[in-house]
Amino acid sequence: MEVTPLRKAARRGLADEAADRVREAIFAGHFRPGAPLREVELAASLEISRGSVREGIAQLAREGLVRCGWHRPTTVVEVTAADVEEVYSVRAALDRLAAVTARTTATAEDLDELDALVAELATAVRTNADGPRLLALDIAFHDRVYAAAANGRLTEAWEAVRSQVFLFQLQRISLGQEHYRARVVAEHRELAELIRAGDRGRLARVAEHHVESARDSLLGRIRTE
C-alpha cells in the first residue's frame, strides 16, 4: 500500500505563544477595546521576533479579537452595538443547542464539574473577586457544557466566537458590574440544575434567555456611554 508523503507536524511555536500572551493581556483588561497593539513594543516585551508577533496577531485577528490591515494600525476590536447583536445572536443559538444536548450526553463527572464551577463562582462573588476572575469561571462553565455535549462541530462553532464573547463580556462588566454580579451565580446554578435533571423545553428557554440578558445589559451600557 502506497503511503502519501506528509510533512512532519510543526511543533508549537513562538507565534502561538505570542497569541496566547496578548490574548491573556486583552482578557485581563491590560489592552482595552480600541487600544493599539504595536508590533515593535510587543516583540520587545515578549523577547521574540517581530515576525512571531505578526503571526500571533494574525491568529488573534482570525479569532475576531483584533483588527489589522494595510496602512492602518492594529487595534483591539471596539465593541459596537452591531457587533454585539451579531455575536450574541449566534451564541444564543449555540448555547441553546449545547445545553439541551448536554442534558442527554453529560456524564456524572461533567455534572459534578458544573456544580463545582457554580460553587467557585459563588465563592468568587462572596469574596469580591475582580471581574476578569468571575468571567474566567463563567466561560469555564460554558466550556464544560460544550464538552459535555460531546459534539465536535458544535464545540468548533463555540470556539470560533469564544474569544469575542469573552471580550464583549469583559466590556460589559467594565461598564458596570452590578447587573452581572447580581445574576451570575443564580443563572449558572439554574443551568446546571436543568442540565442535570430538568425539562428540555425549559432548559432551552433558560439557556437562550441567559445570553439575551447579557446582550441586553451590554447594549444598554454601550448606548448609555
Image (spheres, helix red, strand yellow):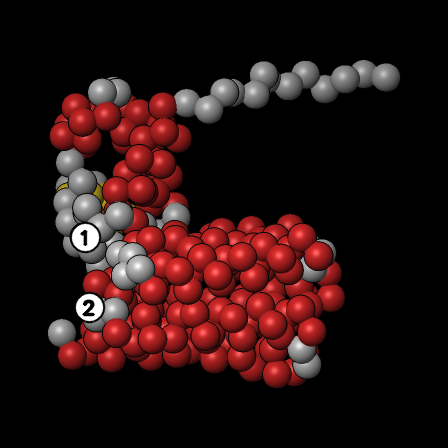
Disc 2/disc 1 C-alpha distance (Å): 12 Å
Q: Nearer the viewer, mark 2 or mark 1?
A: 2
Q: Where's residue 114, x and y in %? A: 57, 59
Nearer-N-terminus badge (2/1): 1
Residue drawn at x 62%, y 57% as measured from the top left: 112
Q: Which mark is residue 32?
A: 1
Q: Position of residue 7 (x, y in %)?
A: 59, 17
Q: Nearer the viewer, residue 158 or 146?
A: 146
Q: Residue at x 46, y 24 (%)?
A: 12
- The type of residue carrying mark 1 is Arg
Rendered view: 65 above or below 96: above
Could you tell whether 72 is left or right of 209 in the image? left
Q: Amino acid at mark 2?
A: Leu
Q: Which mark is residue 181?
A: none
Image x and y of residue 129, in percent: 29, 57
Give the left or right position of residue 135, taking residue 89 as reference: left
* Quadrant location, the C terminus: bottom left
Name the one closer to the observer, 81 or 174: 174
Question: Are dots 2 and 1 in contact, CB under 8 Å?
Answer: no
- 10 Å neighbourhood of mark 2: few (<14), some, or many (≥20)? some
Q: Secondary structure at mark 2?
A: loop
Task: Say which quarter of the image contains residue 108.
Answer: bottom right
Residue at left 66%, top 63%?
A: 102
Instruction: Report whether residue 55 is seen.
Output: no
Residue behind mark 2: 175
Q: Can the viewer see residue 160?
A: yes
